[in-house]
Amino acid sequence: MTTVVVVGSGIAGLTAALHAHEAGADVTVVTKGALADTNTRWAQGGIAAVTSPGDSVDAHAADTLRAGAGLADDAAVHVLVSAGPDRIDELVRRGVAFDRTADGDLARGLEAAHGMPRVLHAGGDATGAEIQGALGTAVRAAGIEVREHAALRDLLVVDGHVAGVTLVVDGATTELRADAVVLATGGAGQLYAHTTNPAGATGDGIAAAIRAGAAVADLEFVQFHPTALAVGEPFLVSEAVRGDGAVLVDDDGRRFAFDAHPDGELAPRDVVARANARAMAAQDGRPVRLDATALGTERLAARFPTIDAAVRARGLDWSRAPIPVTPAAHYLMGGVVTDLDGRTTIPGLYAVGETARTGVHGANRLASNSLLEGAVFGARAGDAAGRPVSDGWPVVPAVGLPAPEPVAPSADAPPFSRETLQQLLWDAAGLIRDGDGLDRAAGILAAWRAAGAPSSLEDDNLLLVAAHVVDAARARTGSVGAHFRSDAPATAAAGRTSAASISSPSEALAC
Ligand code: SIN
């Protein structure tokens, strides 16, 4: 029987585990926290899929490609959107109770850069929690072994083939052998001083894959969500709130988003995030405001109960006054390079969800395509990983830009700390970058790495992924999608596709 280890327990990991199990494999899920401690659990807006007669795979694909700013991969996008309806059926079968209209149809929300309402949600804005709960129950019911509080240290690779993982459990390192390993550890939002991600988003799977020699790509494409609450700890205020009619205003009450894009607040996420950053810069860094007052008390509480509670817990009443919001790191479009079944460049190693770089997101992910990505590519990777190992391993081509010239370690790097690293990335590799800042950051990161590993495994992982993010951003000398360089704002990016360009010509003028 094929043995499979799935590392990570969000939608991508648990879907992969269920599919590998149903394909006949002996599956173990390992996760560094409790089973439900995942990014998925925090997802609010929902999951995008074609589920209405007025919608089509072509329309969803066109929106995905447009948001991806010319760098999304056509074939990957087609797989993503065409498999969406089946994966929604599967989630419903596994117990996910999506919100429905009074006549029993699926309720569909509108989010930025979607041509029509197609975002399914559950519990109003608790979609991720609902999916996490249903998949966790399904995994337990299937009898799949779950090892919680087991942190991935490294991949075991024997004769060029993955042979399992090493784990840290209660401070001790142990081995877990397997024929196939699926990395589903999410992204690395903790690279940044401000993030919507939970504490566990430290790039563990990506770092382990890099150490094992797997190809990674597109790490310069970090998505910043436009609207995190700017009071207390950053807390996501879903794009669905803008889809429902909320607008962004500056200190003068002016709707500034139309300066950047004709779709205003519903422009692609990278455009709105930068518009917010620029508006904040123009008012000495004070947060912009999200005005949701037109939605009214009852609608806000019923449609967005989680956000409503978070807003009110901060002493704000968003039914009466606009609330302060700011961009925050949210999602990594790049990751471990895979084919359309999650296979990486190392035989036996798969990557899915935010850990993977499938090409579906290009330079900027369309809202609510992330849960869909986890469901679609988790299923495909699980199906593939569960099959007998004798099935062979295709060549998975590495993509991405060539690495830039290395930078010498900086002689005046500050001492390493998690906070210093996060501020460095926020300042130098954040929403708006430039070559000098990136080179300086690369020098500091090189000095920290030369000084030896930080004391914690998570910090070590963050430092390694940070060095790759910064190098990827140095290599891409033009602006495209979420990667915006103020030293080359209007330049089409050098890259592997010809269609790269900035998302909105007016943005170049505004810089
Ligand atoms: C949101 O609800 O705005 C986030 C959804 C996403 O990340 O796509």
Image (cartoon, grey):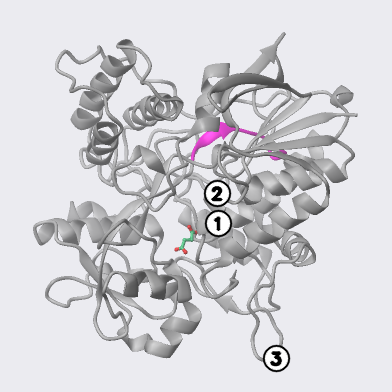
Residue pointed to by mark 3: 103
Above or below, comparing residue 374 to residue 26 in the picture: below
Left or right position of 362 against 93? left
Image spot of residue 35 (x, y percent): 63, 47
Labels 2 & 1 near each other (Cβ < 8 A): yes
Please name whichever residue, 431 or 387, is drawn nearer the observer in this view of the structure: 387
Q: Secondary structure at mark 1?
A: helix
Measure the alpha-carbon separation of dots 3 and 2.
35 Å
Residue pointed to by mark 1: 41
Q: Secondary structure at mark 2?
A: loop
Q: Amino acid at mark 1?
A: Arg
Q: Disc number at residue 222?
A: none
Please name whichever residue, 314 or 82, is drawn nearer the observer in this view of the structure: 314
Residue pointed to by mark 2: 37
How many other residues sit within 10 Å of disc 1, few (<14), some (14-19) or many (≥20)? many
Quadrant of residue 133 in the image?
A: bottom right
